[in-house]
Structures are given as C-alpha cells and as structure tokens.
Amino acid sequence: MAALTKAEALGIIRRAYGPDLAASIADRLPDQFDPDNDADMERLIDLGLTRDGLANALGGEL
C-alpha cells in the first residue's frame, strides 16, 4: 500500500475508531503515514490503534 497523507489516515481512523479518537490523536500523527513501515505502525500502536482495526475500516488488509 502506498503512503497515506495525514488527512487520509485520519479518515480511516475515524471510520475504524470514531471521530473522538481521531480528533484526540490528530496532532500526534505524522504528515505522511506508510502502513508498510514498521515504525509508522508502531506509532499507531502506541496511540492505541491496531493493524486489524485499520484493515477492517479499509475493508481488507494493510
């Protein structure tokens, strides 16, 4: 999967976890997020998000 912009990542997070969580972590997300990058995924895990939750919001796998 290609890198996502912060806005795209927030849209996925909104669908997967709701608007409140997306708003609460928006300032801690990078400008670009690459689901194939382990460091980027670790950052999301540190924020309480999971790869499975994001994949489910996308309707597939990350």
Image (cartoon, grey):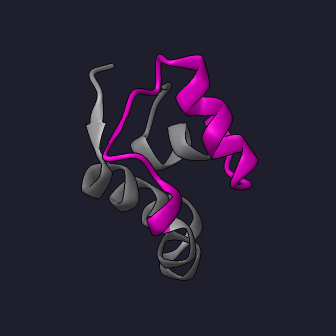
- Magenta span: 26-52
Name the image quarter holding residue 20. Answer: bottom right
Q: Quadrant of the N terminus?
A: top left
Q: Is residue 24 visible?
A: yes
Q: Is residue 8 above or below residue 37?
A: below
Front in this rendered view, residue 54 or 21: 21
Nearer the observer, 15 or 29:
29
Report the front residue among 45 and 52. 45
User: How many marks can you see?
Assistant: 0
> What residue is drawn where x is 38% and y is 59%?
10
On the image, the x and y values in percent for residue 21 come to: 59, 73
Q: Residue 22, image x and y in percent?
A: 50, 70
Residue under the image location 52 percent in, 59 percent down: 28
Residue 52 showing in the rendered view:
no
Q: Residue furthest bottom?
A: 20
Figure check: 40 above or below 49: above
Residue 48 in magenta? Answer: yes
The vertical placement of 15 against 54, above or below, is: below
- The x and y percentages for residue 49 are 67, 50
Query: Image height check: is 4 above or below 26?
Result: above
Is 4 in the magenta? no
Dividing the picture into quadrants, the one containing residue 33 is top left
Residue displayed at 31% across by 51% down: 6
